[in-house]
Image (tube, rainbow, N blue to C red):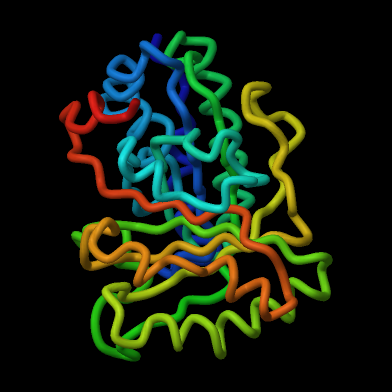
Amino acid sequence: MSEDTHTEAYGQLAAVGPYGVRPGHALITMVEPAPGHECAYNRWYEDDHYYAGAMAMPWMYAGRRWVATRELQLLRYPTASAVAQPMTKGCYLSVYWITEGRYDEHMQWTVGINKRLNRDGRVYHEREHVFTSFQDHEATVYRDGAAGPRDRHALDHPYAGLVLEVIDAEGPQQRTELLEWLRDRHLPKRLAGSDAAMVTVFRPTPLPGDRMTYVKQVEGVDTRLTLLWFLAEDPRVRWQERYGGLDGEVAESGLGRVELVAPFIPTVPGTDRYVDELR
């Protein structure tokens, strides 16, 4: 007798709840494979986990992987980072969009499927989660206004690079002020005439208590903002001119401190390209 997969429930579930296309939530996960496991980790993630542990889940509708070669890792700052120690740690970054208003439903599924993947021996444990959290969308700032791809397209559009920026405010009230400053003043000025098409801004949410033990609880739930800069060019092109000094500008605002600025380039799905350039 075949296993009961509750097929009848799918038609019922499809008829209720929001089903828009805005990226209301995101999973942002920066991971470091254990030394000597770079190739095996990459193959597991590319061949299995990207799909079974992410894209096959309900309400997770877009995803993309990024990589920081050693050359890119050495461009990161500040050295004294609260996110990554040493700052070169975390050579792979995966970003996924989740439909607005479907966070709770997705979390129910992701906890269940990850328990199953562990039970079935389909989780690669020789890795460290350096910066992993589900996050709520706060704002998107565009360089070109209404022209060009929207944030819903960002993980499908062939951007040549991405910059992950993590900023901590002193407290919840300061984070609100920091968000307003970023959205209304800092980011529009920085984006004008640059190679970055947009910046999405998220705030982290706590992970459920029944999460996998190898994923640590999220820090800075009340104080942190995560920025994703989507670039039309390789971030190594005029890196210092375009993306240097972000920490100083935030510090001058008096609203927070930058804990990480890290450039990445997209992986080439289904290949081991860049694996031999990580160390």
Viewer-nearest residue: 144 or 54:
144
Q: In the drawing, does residue 234 fall left or right of residue 106?
A: left
Compared to 149, does 25 lie above or below?
Answer: above
Q: In the drawing, does residue 253 fall left or right of residue 28?
A: right
Image x and y of residue 61, in percent: 37, 53
Q: Residue at x 46, y 65 (%)?
A: 23
How many callouts does the rendering have?
A: 0
Compared to 93, does 139 lie above or below?
Answer: below
Residue 240 sits in which quadrant? bottom left
Q: Which residue is drawn at 50% across and 68% down?
A: 245
Image x and y of residue 113, in percent: 51, 28
Residue 177 sits in which quadrant? bottom right
**Quarter of the figure that contains the C terminus:** top left
Viewer-nearest residue: 271 or 162:
162
Residue 192 sits in which quadrant? bottom left
Image x and y of residue 118, in percent: 52, 15
Q: Which residue is drawn at 74% across and 54% down?
A: 221
Q: Which residue is drawn at 67% across and 72% down?
A: 251
Q: In the drawing, does residue 189 fall left or right of residue 213?
A: left
Viewer-nearest residue: 226 or 195:
195
Image x and y of residue 234, in percent: 23, 58
**Quarter of the figure that contains the N terminus:** top left
Viewer-nearest residue: 15 or 238:
238
